[in-house]
Image (cartoon, grey):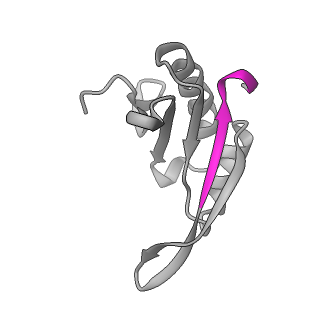
Amino acid sequence: MNHPGNLAIDVDGEVFGSIGLFPQTDIHQKSAELGYWLAEPFWGNGIVPQAIGEIVEYGFKTFDIVRIYARPFSTNRASQRVLEKAGFTCEARHKKALYKNGEFMDELVYVTFKDEY
């Protein structure tokens, strides 16, 4: 994972997950996509909102971007709450944009902006 925006989520020296910020290209070059995961035993401890806050700050300082977005499944309310706690707002809902395990789901787009963060 040799990328300056892909980092481990570490608590007291142990890795419990990963978080990544991926600047886009071409006409999307001023945006970066955020992705993350955390091992289930550590859910609900405030780890991911803190990690998101840190990587957003890092991203706006490191990359020439003005917008960071994440695209959680509409069924993943926990991830939506994490993004909201980290200061993101829901910008869009793409209806039936995802097809997984034989079912359609909506995809949400959460966003934060450099001049608002």
> Is 59 contained in the magenta span?
no
Q: Position of residue 5 (x, y in %)?
A: 40, 27
Q: Which image quarter: residue 74?
A: bottom right
Which residue: 49% across, 54% down?
A: 40
Left of 88 or right of it: where is 13? Answer: left
The x, y position of residue 33, in whole percent, is 48, 40
Quarter occupied by the N terminus = top left
Which of 19/45 is in front?
19
Q: Classify residue 3 as left or right of residue 100.
A: left
> Residue 79's x, y, as percent?
61, 54
Q: Is residue 97 above or below residue 43?
A: below
- Magenta-highlighted residues: 108-116
Question: 68 or 28, which lies in front?
Answer: 28
Comparing 113 with 83, the one in front is 113
Q: Residue at x 53, y 24 (%)?
A: 65
Residue furthest top as drawn: 61
